[in-house]
Amino acid sequence: MSDTGDIIGIIERFFETGKTKDLTPLKEIQLNDENFSSFSDVPPYDLKDYATTIALEELRFVSISDYNYEIKNPKISIFDNTAIVAFELMQKGMLVDNKAFTGEHIIINGRATFVLVKKPTWKIAHIHLSKISTES
């Protein structure tokens, strides 16, 4: 498979975790060292490290049932052993509150940027997710 195919496959594995609820790939496809970082539009808004990011991703993906996603207009730029992937992202599902036995249908339109490094296989080194405001 080409680098481009490998890279998009890793991004898809990341989001497929939300559908399968198998959290194992999150640790396999992200760079577990001090150079990893992530930002998102979900509090807390600070720059997160690997361990914090994994914990928050796991919580997020198990809290959304009937999860689905669509990656739109991906742009993959490869510079030697570094890749930048930018795309529009639609996520939807049922946000479940197990304590109150309630749920809320959600649709999140957003943008995403992933930075990957090849060490020796492609790993996610940085994630930035942001919602697109639908307010006018």
Image (cartoon, helix red, strand yellow):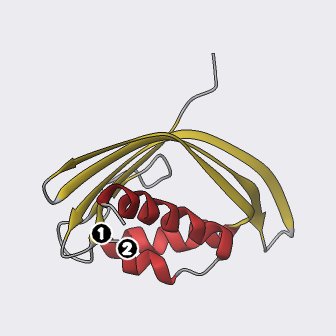
**One can see residue 126 in this view:** no
Seen as rendered, the residue at the extreme top is 136
Name the residue tied to disc 1.
123
Q: CA distance from mark 2 to mark 1?
A: 5 Å
Secondary structure beneath dot 1 equals: strand
Q: Is residue 12 above or below residue 24?
A: above
Say which quadrant the N terminus sits in. bottom left
Q: In the image, residue 114 lies at what x, y percent?
A: 35, 52
Q: In the image, residue 67 lies at what x, y percent?
A: 71, 61
The circle drawn on residue 29 is: 2
**One can see residue 44 in this view:** yes
Q: How many marks?
A: 2
Marks 2 & 1, CB-CB < 8 Å contact: yes
Q: Nearer the viewer, residue 43 or 40?
A: 40
Is residue 98 found left or right of 55 in the rendered image?
Answer: right
Secondary structure beneath dot 2 equals: helix
Q: Quadrant of residue 20?
A: bottom right
Identify the residue at horizontal 35%, vertical 76% (top origin).
51
Q: Nearer the viewer, residue 93 or 16?
A: 16
Is residue 56 found left or right of 126 in the rendered image?
Answer: right
Q: Earlier in the sequence, mark 2 or mark 1?
A: 2
